[in-house]
Amino acid sequence: MPVIDGYRNIHHVTASETLAQIQLSKGINPVAEVRAPSGRRRPAILIRSSPWKAGTTETPWHDVFDLDHGHVCYYGDHRSDHTVPVGSTPGNAVLLDAFAKHQALAPDERAQATPLLLFAAVSRNNTSKGYVEFCGVAVIEHAEQIEHEVRGLKFPNYRYELTVFDLSAEDDQVDWAWIEARGRADLSVADTLEHAPLSWCRWVEHGHPALSKMRRHVSSERRHQASRRDPLTDSLEQPGLFPPPRQPLDTLPAWPEPDEPQRDLTASMLVDELRNLEEHRANGRQSRHKSLTLLWSVSRVAAGKPRLARWSEFRNEVGELLVEFDRPESHVSPEYPFWQLQKSRLWHVEGFPTEAPAEPHAAVFDRFDPAAGLTEQAARLLDDAFVRSQAVAILRETHLADIDHHALMTELGLAGYESASGVPCDAGEQETEPRPRHPTRRMVTLSRIVRDPELAARVKRLHDDRCQVCDLQLQTRFGTYSEAAHVRGLGHPHNGPDELSNLLVLCPNHHVQFDALAIYVDADDTVRTTVDDKPMGQLRRHPAHRIDKGHLRYHRALCGRDRE
């Protein structure tokens, strides 16, 4: 039946001679793989989120669907009574496999990746079961193992952060012919893209760097228009399509409300907000007001200062920053970022009377001296050294690329983020003798990091003084030469460990490039240039030299290139 109780029948919409009848009986419902000319591929994975058992002993988690901003936080299917490894339950196994394909670096590999089709269980006709709404197409951006606790019993599971694609080019609908085509063994993966959404095709072509641009974002006007649509009439006018996504019902309390944009902020959301920051433009050139202010705010977190600053303090500090580092043609207006950054999910203003004007001037701020700064969740996330490194890199590269970085970073106390080595711990030297008028030498007390020279010698012997990037063995008059580079620098703020798993053997050229963040090692050991992400080759490994993945990921974060 095409319609049941006045609503589209999803099984009728998805009926196919190619695919078996789809299932939504479980939370994670994979469609069977097919063996096609371009390799094995799974047509789709259908994910259903239901609020009815959320927070119970059986499912002690709450999935979070933030469709307005294209983010979904979804939990796997490992439960407290499972005795198998956490990644081997049917749902987690299929999602982890999909996640690996979603991280592919080549377009032909991404074309093989499995789309996730998201559904939410909803209440209809006083019935809480049997009805679902289609919520969009997604890929997994991040997966991590977490821990739940039920009645004092702890057990592991996986949490997946999904990016929901923008389907505005398709009027927020998906052609089921795309999924059918992916299920036909006689079609190449290139043939299946003919029916795919535009945003999916662009993601296949450009990969992870374009993901933030492909993310679904719903304006208030678009949300209002969607709420006035008739789900039955609109979908029947185009019988080959799913019903359009709508705002979730109040039966899903875990989903963020529009007036709580900071709720359930994640690290990936924070990075996206920074990358997609909208700056004011004048004469075709972008201002730096907001980006400089956010970098200033990050420096406060790094220094352990309060996240909120009074207007009087903000005006002086940010004002001086704008005078020195904003464009010459830009007006020095600290009141602009102080107020307008509230449009992002990262900023909060308090201590302002409700009767104040909607667009207050500096004189109004002078009168009331309100406070502004990062939201609690943004500050908490940035308190993590890894996230902070990523945020600094994104702001520098995306919005502040054409300024004197050394001067700016030194001014903000963030000089350690300019290189992988950080700032040496000898900046606090203390004189023990009066300084003469014409000194030739003086006595100082220094605090230095003590490195283990045997570690460096050992790792260089393992690799026979050959660079792990280019395999060069540099010949000298008395033998060969290489350098031991710390992946996560020992200096501030990185504070990396002096251990074998934190070392690489590099030639002098690649040591300089690695330390200057000009090259990085991707998650699959591909060495890439930061400026254009082009591959230079593979990092050569030695079985007796284990390199900590966390240190390599930290270095990628410094480069603004974390892709795990």
Image (cartoon, grey):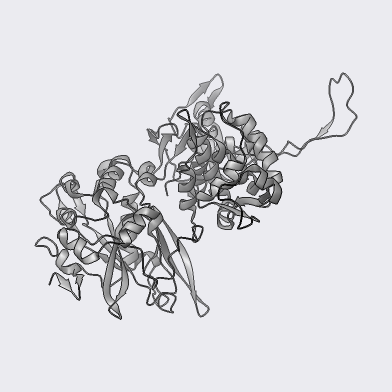
Which quadrant holds residue 52? bottom left
Query: Residue 17, can we see it?
Result: yes
28 w.r.t. 339: above or below: below
Residue 511 in picture, x, y percent from top left: 53, 31
- Number of numbered tags placed on the structure image: 0
108 w.r.t. 144: above or below: above
Task: Assign the N terminus to one quadrant of the image.
Answer: bottom left
477 w.r.t. 419: above or below: above
Query: Residue 498, can we see it?
Result: no
Q: Nearer the viewer, residue 264 or 205?
A: 264
Q: Residue at x 54, y 29 (%)?
A: 512
Residue 264 in picture, x, y percent from top left: 49, 61
Which quadrant holds residue 28? bottom left
Q: Nearer the viewer, residue 165 or 490?
A: 165
538 w.r.t. 327: above or below: below
Residue 234 in picture, x, y percent from top left: 21, 61
Q: Is residue 55 left or right of residue 490?
A: left
Q: Residue at x 22, y 69 (%)?
A: 23
Q: Residue at x 41, y 42 (%)?
A: 525
